[in-house]
Image (cartoon, rainbow, N blue to C red):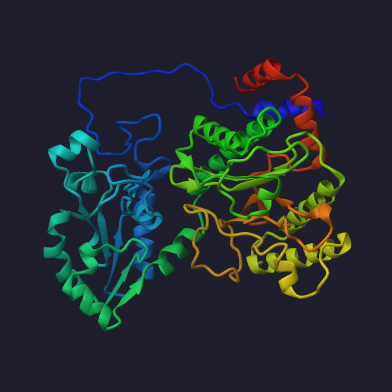
Amino acid sequence: MQILVRKLLQRATPFKQGIVRRTYSTNKVHDIGQPTPATHPQLLKEGEITPGITTEEYISRRKRLLELLPENSLAVIAAAPIKMMTDVVPYTFRQDADYLYITGCQQPGGVAVLGHECGLCMFMPEATRHDVIWQGEVAGVDAALETFKAEKAHPLSKLRDILPGMIRGSSKLFHNMQTATPIYTELDDFQRAALTGKVKDLSNFTHELRWIKSPAELKLMKEAASIVCQGLLQTMLHSKMYPHEGMLAAKIEYESKMRGAQRMAFNPVVGGGSNGSVIHYSRNDQKIKNGDLVLMDVGCELHGYVSDLTRTWPPCGSFSSVHEELYNLVLETNKESIKLCRPGVSLRQIHNYSVEMLCKGFKEIGILKGSGSNSYHQLNPTSIGHYLGMDVHDSSNISYDRLLKPGVVITIEPGVYIPSIFDGPDSYRGIGIRIEDEVLITETGYEVLTGSMPKEVKHIESLLNNYSRGNGMEAQNNLEAASS
């Protein structure tokens, strides 16, 4: 078991050290408001628009979208808007997945138009001198043509002059309803098209494209999964010394960003004790009591692609008999559900199997009395999983009844959430357990992308207790040594 612990700790190194060669040039490198191979050679290779995704792949995405769209139709995709925390403080910007998928532009303010005749036409924001001083450079018309490889580009101020004619010349108009902006929805020609039923939602097409990942996308997703596994391992080791929800949330974010993630995929769920029974608990403000479990649902984002992982464990280092009984039921459901993952099976079928397995186990334990779905949903109202990709709940327009195909990534996340007011034995009240893995559907079956993160009871207990034999400063030194 000690060999297992050493191997796991060796995997958790935050970065590789080595000799770095730097070259210097007197030529000025132009900043376009996001990384390019010229400004960030450590992130992008030549020929890439965003890290890991080449110009050719972006152009292929545009062609495939045009092939799905009806003849002589037009697609309008707006960038995500800036959202404000206060009158002068914005929230951290995150680009809309569809806009990023088609254009590669990571910045707000733009509107992209895709058509069979015009190709990709981008309307780009114009930065004033004041904007540049306060917020930095932004991608403009030149970047649209040279970096994003649009066929046409115009300043955003010209949209009202140019887009109406494009709308009138199209037979159907599709747009991203999630990021629709008045700059084009208030145009008279758009309004007339909407009144005649000519305007439709674009996401049915874009979600179809995004559902099956390319090899380049899968490489980024595997890296994101590896980052969050390493980060959560370090957080698990940290939990015995620092059993506080907020500290564990801070630890996973630190470990993920130290390994290259740009942000967390969502606010970490760190539910200690009865807080773990709250499915999307987000306060993270409580101390975890000795003997209680902590449920951590976490994910990070790497260059536009996210990970999603959940583990539940006792920071004290030992599962109680009640906790272990429930945990092993959820664990077996997790493992048996993963075995069903393959082409030709739907997420709905896997879900139904998991419900049958959990219902049987809940009845044997004695916490499920009735046979109706309402009784089960009081203990687990969630689906077995969801699609994963650029968004946490990716390609949400794709039905869970669709048969899975190679290149699709899903989550498998059975759980039990027993509220504190549960009408049953006191010993089971306020327990929340979820075990979630990312699963890639392959030609022959599946690959668990988060398989390096321990989930067996004996492995978790051994990991926590072997690591924390040395308390205080000694344990902290061990952590630093394991990360070096």
Q: Is residue 117 visible?
A: no
Residue 338 image position (x, y, % from top left):
71, 55
In the shown orientation, is residue 131 left or right of residue 390? left
Q: Quadrant of the N terminus?
A: top right
Residue 160 image position (x, y, % from top left):
14, 64
Q: Residue at x 64, y 18 (%)?
A: 481
Residue 261 image position (x, y, % from top left):
48, 37
Q: Residue at x 75, y 24 (%)?
A: 468
Q: Is residue 251 visible?
A: yes
Which residue is nearer to you in this view: 285 or 362?
A: 285
Which residue is nearer to you in this view: 423 or 107?
A: 423
Q: Residue at x 73, y 62 (%)?
A: 379
Position of residue 359 relative to residue 462, above or below, is: below
Residue 399 picture quarter: bottom right
Q: Quadrant of the C terminus?
A: top right
Residue 369 picture quarter: bottom right
Position of residue 81 relative to residue 34, above or below, is: below
